[in-house]
Every structure is written in C-alpha cells, then in structure tokens.
Image (cartoon, rainbow, N blue to C red):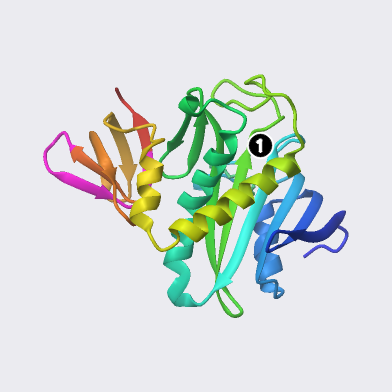
Amino acid sequence: MQKDYNHSEGFIRDYSLYSYKEISSTNTVAKELSESGSAKGIVTALTQSGGRGRRERVWDSPEGGLWFSLFETVPDEDIRKLSFFMNFGIILAAINTMKQYLDSDTLKVKWPNDIYASGKKLGGVLLETFDGPSGKTVVSGMGLNTWNGSKENWTSLLDLGIKKVPNFEILEKLIMNLNILREKLYDSSEELMAGWEKYDLFSGKTVKVKSSQGNFEGTVKGYSSSGALIISASSGGIRTIETGEVENVR
Ligand code: BTN
C-alpha cells in the first residue's frame, strides 16, 4: 500500500475507520488493509482515481459523492451469509437512510445491487470476496450520489433538491441502520428479502435478464432466500437466476 495517502483513522460504531482524501478505489484499499491484519473496517475517500463498478465498469467518483467500502474477515464457513448480508442488507440500510431525506415511495432497489430514486440510479454496490490471512474477507463498496451533480441516467440528492448534510452524517446513519438490520435479520434471509421486495423496481414486471445461465424474458415472481431472482419465463417454466443483469421491458 502507498504510504503517502493523506488520511485519518478512527472509529465509526464497531468499525475501524480509514478516511482518505484521494485513493484509487476504497475497495482496493479495503482489501489491502484486511491483508495487513485489520479485521473489520470502513474505508472512505473524498475522490477515487480508479473507482470501479460492476462488470469492470468505471465508477466516476468526483468530490461530493459518498464513496466507501466496508470490509470484514470471517471463517470460510461464514462467507455466504456475510456476503449475502453485505449486499442486500447494506442496500436496505441505504434505503432506510435515504427515507430520512426522500419520500419513501420514490425509493426502489434494482436487483442485484442498485438503489434508485425517482426512476434513476442513486447508488450501487460492488461486492468482492478474497482469501485473507485468517479466513475470507468480504468487501462491500458503495457509491451514493449525494452532492456530486447528476447525469442523464443517474441522479443525486443534490439533483433531487435535498438540503445539504455532511456525507459523514449520512454514513453514520447508514451504519446505524445496517447494525439494526444485522441484529434483527442476519439469521433470517427470507425476512430480509421480504424487506427487499417492498422496494423492488421489478415486482410483477416483464424483464429481460442476461446471465451466465443464458438470456431470458419473463415476469418477476420474487426472490429466493439466497437472493436469486425468480422469473416465470415467457418461453415457459420458472427460472431461478443467481446473478445477472436485468432490464425492464414493461
Ligand atoms: C455499480 O453500480 O456498478 C457498483 C458501483 C460501486 C461503486 C463504489 S464507490 C466505493 C467503492 N469503491 C469502488 O471502486 N467501487 C465502490
């Protein structure tokens, strides 16, 4: 890891906090910190020079947005449960946090890891797992467009006319909401997915899905307790899709 990062350290609830001015990617630095022995932490950056999105897309990360990664190392046998929670749980925690600023009816989740507001993308999660020195490490990186403007296909709190609050305040609320969900629902993935379905952008809609299992069109029926998308395929039969990209058709 570079040593000349302009950074500070502290705590936010039960996470060690590593805050940087500019780094390549909070996910990359989270991985490095876990490799050097930190067991559970949060990495934040004011800007990222190499912010990464899903499917190797670039994640534009100018100053103003909330860019952070949570990381945690657990024994191998706990990795599935933690990964599931660090994807679906953190998105629900973000929704619960955004409800304090935005009308809840305008907030949606887009499977598998996006947050929408008023029909446009407000944020997303990049989940990565690594073999660590004492188990497996989950890194859950979230980008939330707070005060960084907008573009044609995404929105931000600024764009939605919300009065500015510090990003750190939003992050603290989000971690508090995550801890609440963790206490209540960590052992109940069905209930967590039921919470997800309440905000689902696709519920009952006809969608097109691109996945490693193939490309399908069908109507969204719901989600399995492992977070897979269940569709009733137009070509017949029920499909359970573990991971993929979804596009709304009607
Ligand atoms: C996506 O929608 O494709 C996921 C975007 C995830 C972006 C965040 S910003 C903080 C963390 N660091 C990264 O490089 N990516 C994630």
Could you tell me which quadrant the N terminus lies in? bottom right
Location of ligand 1 given as a quarter of the image: top right
Residue indicated by mark 1: 60
234 magenta-colored: yes
- Residue 89 horizontal/vertical position (percent): 49, 51
Report crowding for label 1: few under 14, some 14 to 19, many 20 or more residues within 10 A (C-alpha).
some
**Residue nearest the observer in this picture, 63 or 215:** 63
- Residue 172 horizontal/vertical position (percent): 69, 48
Quadrant for residue 161, please give it. Answer: top right
Magenta stretch bounds: 233-245
Residue type beneath disc 1: Asp
Quadrant for residue 28, please give it. Answer: bottom right
Could you tell me which quadrant the C terminus lies in? top left
Residue under the image location 34 percent in, 32 percent down: 202
Question: In the rendered view, does 53 fall on the left or right side of 189?
Answer: right
Residue under the image location 73 percent in, 42 percent down: 169
- Residue 143 horizontal/vertical position (percent): 62, 42
**Residue nearest the observer in this picture, 48 or 196:** 196
Quadrant for residue 149, please give it. Answer: top right
Q: Residue furthest bottom?
A: 134
Find out if the beta carbon at label 1 lies less than 8 Å from the nearest ligand 1 atom: no
Question: In the rendered view, does 154 fall on the left or right side of 119?
Answer: right
Question: In the rendered view, does 72 fall on the left or right side of 216?
Answer: right
**Residue nearest the observer in this picture, 108 or 127:** 108
- Residue 136 horizontal/vertical position (percent): 53, 72
129 magenta-colored: no
The kind of secondary structure element at disc 1 is: loop
Residue under the image location 71 percent in, 67 percent down: 33
